[in-house]
Amino acid sequence: MSRFVAARSLNDALEVMARGEARALAGGTDLMPRLRRARLAGEPLPNVIVDVSRLSELTRLDLGSERPYIGAGISFRRLESDLEVERTYPILKQAAATVGSVQVRQTASIGGNVANASPAADGVTALVALGARAEVVSIRERRFCRVEELITGPGQTILANDELILGFELDRLKSRDGQVFSKVGRRRGVSVARLNVAVCLDPAFSDCRVVLGACFPSPRRLNDVEELLANGVAGDALWREAGRKATDLFQDVCGWRSSAAYKVQAIARVTGRTLALAWERVARGA
């Protein structure tokens, strides 16, 4: 049976985590079901659950500075409703709005979404598009790591047992208008993504970002697609070619199987459609 500890300060939390097998809990919407499954499967549970939900360091939101920052404890509901988020990083608002139900978004945190390392995590796909660097802390050290490097596979990260994600530094993008997040779920309403796409475009195509989620072990930037866009001319032909190239990259990594037939078609369609919408918003905002 795990022991529950409510951390009174960040140092308090890190000291507890340094003593042995412990897991941090903020919203708990990912962690608690995971622990329940582990218990039913007879797998070992952490000795301590450390509640970090009341720590002010994890709820810092500073998007106007030279190094925009989002605390790991910020809920998806706050990302969905915050005016500063909408003004500077609308892709985060769009992604947050697709996460679970309103009740889930009230408690689920962006840091928990990353730490859970689901290939279908909507928040992770958006963060990768924004070049997010996770600030990871422990009693031993403080370090930064790109989100796509932090996650090594489904449910797997490079985090040590005594480490905690404090927050995320984001790139300052050249344009807010060309940020679009798209998701395909198994059904309308509350659903886990079968496919999600995050796109960031600027008017000159000098900083194109295309990220595909729920298709690989973790969300991945499509560098070949970005290069195609940087050397192309905006229009339907380019969006279709980008969709085809995204599909090729998926098949190169994952191979061909009958269960992927739907996804192959959806990747081309959704990638092209998301790029077209992003460009439409760039042109409208120019």
Image (cartoon, grey):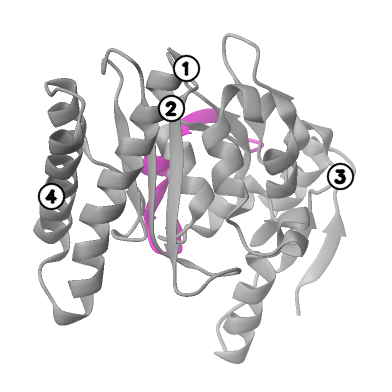
Say if residue 146 shows up in the picture: no
Mark nearer the N terminus (1 vs 3): 3
Measured in 3D between alpha carbons, the distance from the residue under mark 1 to the one under mark 2, in whole angstroms, is 6 Å
Q: Nearer the viewer, mark 4 or mark 1?
A: 1
Q: Nearer the viewer, mark 4 or mark 3?
A: 4
Query: Which residue is at a point 43% across and 49% down the rendered structure image?
Result: 182
Is there CB contact under 8 Å for labels 1 and 3?
no
Kind of element beneath mark 3: loop
For mark 1, does the 10 Å Cα neighbourhood hold few (<14), some (14 to 19), or many (20 or more) residues?
few
The residue pinned by badge 1 equals 285
Is there CB contact under 8 Å for labels 4 and 1?
no
Taking the magenta stretch, the answer to whether it contains residue 150 is yes
Is there CB contact under 8 Å for labels 1 and 2?
yes
Query: Which residue is at a point 58% across and 55% down the rendered structure image?
Result: 98
Measured in 3D between alpha carbons, the distance from the residue under mark 4 to the one under mark 1, in whole angstroms, is 28 Å
Query: Which residue is at a point 57% across and 15% down the rendered structure image?
Result: 67
Tag of residue 109:
none
Does 125 sit above or below residue 43?
above
Mark nearer the N terminus (4 vs 1): 4
Tag of residue 281:
2
Q: Position of residue 162 (x, y in %)?
A: 61, 49
Q: Is residue 104 left or right of residue 220?
A: right
- Residue sitting nearer the eye, 283 or 101: 283
The residue pinned by badge 4 equals 244
Q: Nearer the viewer, mark 4 or mark 2?
A: 2
Measured in 3D between alpha carbons, the distance from the residue under mark 2 to the one under mark 3, in whole angstroms, is 38 Å
Say if residue 268 shows up in the picture: yes
Mark nearer the N terminus (4 vs 2): 4
Kind of element beneath mark 2: helix
Q: Nearer the viewer, mark 2 or mark 3?
A: 2
The residue pinned by badge 3 equals 54
